Image: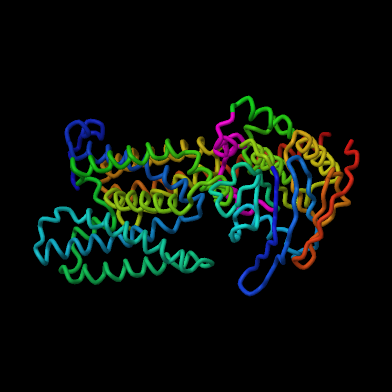
Amino acid sequence: MRVNVTNLTFGYDYRTVLKDLSFKINSGDFLAVIGNNGSGKSTLIKCMLGINKVGPNQIFLDDVDIATYKSFINIGYVPQKFDDFNYEFPITVNEILTASNISNITEDSKLEILDKIGILELQHENINNLSGGQLQRVFIVRSLMNNPKMLILDEPTVGVDRKNVEAFYKTVNELNKDGITIILITHNIHESNANYSHVLSIHNGEGVFQEVERGDDE
Amino acid sequence: MILADAPFIVALFDYPFLRYALIAGLIMGFITPLIGSFVIIRRLSFIADTLSHFSLAGLSIGLFLINTIGMDFIGDPLYLAIIASVIGAFIIEILRGYYQNYKEISMPIVMSLGTALSALFISLSGGWNSSIYNFLFGSLLTVGDEYLAIISITTASVLILIIIFYKQIVLVSFDEQYARLVGIKIGRFQFASTLILSLVVSLSIVTVGVLLVSSLMIIPVAAAMKIGKSFRNTMTISIIFSEISVIFGLWISYELDIPPGATIVLINILILVLVVLINKIFVSKRIKQAQKEIQTK
């Protein structure tokens, strides 16, 4: 998915959070968005997903203005926290995934994604019995359910141990190789083995965008 | 109500009103926990209580219009309860939009309004009488063909809607933000679910009365969610608990000549207590076993 953000300015009430932000990435690119807490990283993502409403001619996905978007089904999103999800009520991984399968992908495709992310054996597990890391993988599987062209990962490895962080980015790099555009929000890019192609550094709502040479992710 | 000394099963064949009561109870026992599951997940347990209190205003106004003003064409005050419940639901939705960060404020406001209107119209229609007792605690033994037809049609329609929109309902209930992302119209969804909820609440008043409606929706689900392994499994268990409470509630109320609505709710509570106790015993047993295994290692 191509992303074209042009002179994006966004604020809450009287506070401007993003100031005249512009960047452009192509299909299959891997953008790392870095910045301190409160710099505007998550606000940018919320704008790109239509959670924050932005005006016309500021964000284009595959040349379509998102002001005209009705569904963001072609974007897989893994939020920073899963606070919006209602826990405690019993529901299995499979039940969440089945409900999330809006594009009606086949059962085999679903099992393939579960296997790829390494949680095939958890499919009949009640989500209340899962660890934080396992739960995060469930949400990654969910984000891949509707054949996304782009994945947005908001601080996906906070609270995940080192070994799992490496395994996680290995998977993300593989998904990126398959052609999925990745946008990764992180406050510390050095702790990851993410194989990114572009970096957008946001400081006080202003962005510096640059292309970087891809490393070897193996 | 004094019944024959025949056993409950025999009495069911002999007395049509008892059969009607059982069928009505079983239908409501099926639909209320089904709706209740979604109400609990969306953390709206208090909404059923609020709507039932607002329905009471409709019943009292109905009683006033029929008995005091003489508007007999209204027929059953239950129709006004349904209208009141729907109106109450929309007031709640409007207030929830108005107090974005304090959405629960809407409930006590609507509940107070409902209770105040009820007190006013009960007084205007001549004060306390047996109809009001029935509104408050249910009148399962007096249901007729018309009520059975209404609840059958409502239950069938709600069930069909749940089956058709199952994915969307589950998504919105568990993760509203994700549902929004994949293009589900949350506003419309909320509107429809509130409408259905208000309908089911007002119809349950006949079974257990205004004061006990929310217990019919919430308690079987509260018990089931402690032992359910999956979402479907939890809903199935809650329906089983609810139906057990209806059957045994009606049976015991027949044998002991006590009100069926209250008995049904008390059995629901008993099931909840048993589930919690048994669950605790199992959990502590499992912990002890795990500790033993660690020690032997």
**Residue at 59% from the left image edge and 43% from the top image edge:** A73
Check the image and report above or below for A211 versus B26. Answer: below
Q: What residue occupies the far bottom of the structure in this picture?
A: A14
Residue A93 in the image: state x and y as whole percent.
Answer: 62, 37
What is the quadrant of the C terminus of chain A in the image?
top right
Magenta-tinted stretch: A81-105
Residue A205 in the image: state x and y as whole percent.
Answer: 74, 66
> In this image, A39 relative to B140: left or right?
right
> In this image, A68 relative to A205: left or right?
left
Residue B179 in the image: state x and y as whole percent.
Answer: 55, 47
Residue A194 visible to the viewer: yes
Of B238 and A32, nearer the camera is A32
**Chief secondary structure of the magenta portion:** loop
> In this image, B123 relative to B52: left or right?
left
Q: Does the magenta run of residues contain B211?
A: no
Name which quarter of the figure residue B71 lies in.
bottom left
Residue B273 visible to the viewer: no
**Residue at 42% from the left image edge and 39% from the top image edge:** B162
**Residue at 83% from the left image edge and 45% from the top image edge:** A196
Of B66 and B139, nearer the camera is B66
Q: What residue occupies the far top of the structure in this picture?
A: A108
What is the quadrant of the N terminus of chain A in the image?
top right
Of B30 and A25, nearer the camera is A25
Q: Does the magenta run of residues contain A104?
A: yes
